[in-house]
Image (cartoon, rainbow, N blue to C red):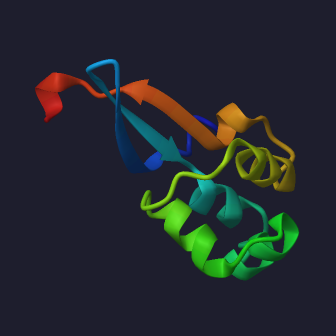
Amino acid sequence: MKALCKFSTIAEESVMGKNYEITNRIRTLRFFANEMSQQALADVTNVSRQTINAIELGKYTPSLDLAYKIANAFNVGIDEVFEYKPIDPRKT
């Protein structure tokens, strides 16, 4: 499944002068979970649908607790949902 599902949506931050991005595969995981709705994921993780939407779009970075709840909702590890990596300066 990982080969078929690219990470999408980006939240950027700077740590010690380096820029990092946080990407997620929530939309893809929802699709492969019988096209789970944002509301269904929100209900499982005990947050609002708007919070799930903001995370998917990269406008909000979830707490560690919420990130684990999201991963658990799909029965995958947190690294299957989120990726944190340096931004390639050649792409900016």
Write the residue at 86% across / 68% down.
44
Work out whether 69 lies above or below 88.
below
Is there any visible trace of residue 6 in the rendered image? no
Q: Is residue 62 visible?
A: yes
**Residue 21 falls in image quadrant:** top left
Q: Nearer the viewer, residue 80 or 69?
A: 69
**Could you tell me residue 30's position as x and y percent?**
69, 64
Q: What residue appears at the point 59 percent right and 40 percent down from the top-left corner? A: 82
Residue at the limit of the structure toward the front, as seen here:
16
**Residue 86: percent from the left, percent from the top?**
36, 23
Residue 76, relative to residue 25: is it above or below?
A: above
Left or right: residue 73 compared with residue 15: right
Q: Is residue 31 above or below residue 90?
A: below
Residue drawn at x 70%, y 78% as measured from the top left:
48
Q: How many marks?
A: 0
**Is 65 above or below relative to 47?**
above
Q: Residue 37 is drawn in which quadrant?
A: bottom right
Please tell me which residue lies in front, 26 or 4.
26
Q: Position of residue 91 (x, y in %)?
A: 16, 32
Left or right of 31 in this view: 21:
left
Front residue of 30/68: it is: 68
Please report the residue visible at 56 percent of the width from the left and 43 percent of the height from the top.
Answer: 4
